[in-house]
Amino acid sequence: MNLQGHGVAVITPFDKKGCIDFFALEKHLNKLISSNVDYLVILGTTSEISTLSILEQIEISEFTVRINNNRLPLVIGVGGNDTLSISHKLNKFKLSSFQSVLSVCPYYNSPSQIGLFEHFSQISTKCSIPVVIYNVPSRTGSNIKPSTVFQLLKKHNNIIGIKEANSSNNQIDELLHFSPNNFQIVSGDDITAVDSILKGAVGVVSVIGNAFPSKINEVVKHALNNETRYALQKHNELRMLMSLIFEEGSPSGIKALMSELGVCENNLRLPLVPVSFNLLEAIKFQLNSLT
């Protein structure tokens, strides 16, 4: 799969009873597709996957495939902190409808680099489609080092990329410098996406892209074309909103923004809750300043 460009980490709308709002999800998917984003990522962190049952995950995956109707490439999140369970879980989805699996580094267990190597080795062996590693230490407490990634690439040719969200050090620079040319590095952080793409990342899996798909398309296109001035100009228009939607955690922030745009209701599943009144007002203010 070609991961170049703008992939959107799709939210899961809920109604007032906490049930999946498939009507809102259908409208949202169609809007993203018509906005010409490059691909959709479902059942990732932004989807609140931790609070979705396996039956709900299967339902969302099949629903998305049906609504998409082969219009865009699809990436499905299948990850966790129990390697054996993930291997079994892979068999529950119709993976032939997806172009790749996005699998997050194990959380809570705090595995060593050897453990991470063995974890992703087993997943890549069991997976029938390409695998993209998702490294987000701020959420998982687990950081896969570039050296471990390179070892995995020597053993498994179906690991095609990494969504790198470790913006606390120069890890993405090491990945970009030493990775094989066919290995795709994707930014997993809206705020630093332009810098990462200008350094050589192939694109971004964006959260704020849910709200502004066409604007993020422009940002990514300019960055990929090394049009630094225009990329930063477009990016800076949304930079404050990008910061705000992560201030009290994601997807609480993006859900607040999406509710203001009339896409879905501002409902989440515990332990996530809507953002505070003050943050919501700040989001509204910044949103109004764009129009």
Image (tube, rainbow, N blue to C red):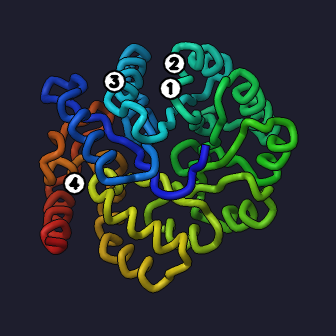
- Residue kind at label 1, given as amino acid type: Ser
Q: Looking at the rendering, in which quadrant would you find the C terminus?
A: bottom left
Say if 234 sits above or below 150 in the image: below
Instruction: Give neighbour class at mark 3: few <14, some 14-19, many 20+ (Cα, 10 Å).
Output: some
Disc 2 to disc 4, C-alpha distance: 32 Å
Q: Quadrant of residue 251?
A: top left
Q: Is residue 52 left or right of residue 90?
A: left
Please tell me which of labels 3 and 4 falls first in the chain.
3
Q: Residues within 10 Å of mark 4 (few under 14, many from 20)?
A: many
Label 1 packing within 10 angstroms: few (<14), some (14-19), many (20+): some
Measure how far apart labels 3 and 1 are at the Cα level. 11 Å
Image quarter (top left, top right, bottom left or bottom right) of the N terminus: top right
For label 1, the residue is 97
Q: How far apart are the alpha carbons under marks 3 and 4?
A: 24 Å
Looking at the picture, tell me which residue is in the foreground, 218 or 285.
218
What distance separates the C-alpha of mark 1 from that of mark 4?
Answer: 30 Å
Q: Which residue is mark 4?
A: 257
Residue type, mark 3 in image: Phe
Marks 1/2: CA distance?
6 Å
Within-10-Å neighbours for mark 2: few <14, some 14–19, many 20+: few
Residue 102 appears in which quarter of the rendering?
Answer: top right
Secondary element at tag 1: helix
Q: Is residue 267 left or right of residue 116?
A: left
Q: Which mark is residue 94?
A: 2
Name the residue tied to disc 3.
Answer: 63
On the image, the x and y values in percent for residue 121 come to: 77, 31
Of residues 244 and 193, the one drawn nearer to the viewer in this rendering: 193
**Disc nearer the start of the sequence (2/4):** 2
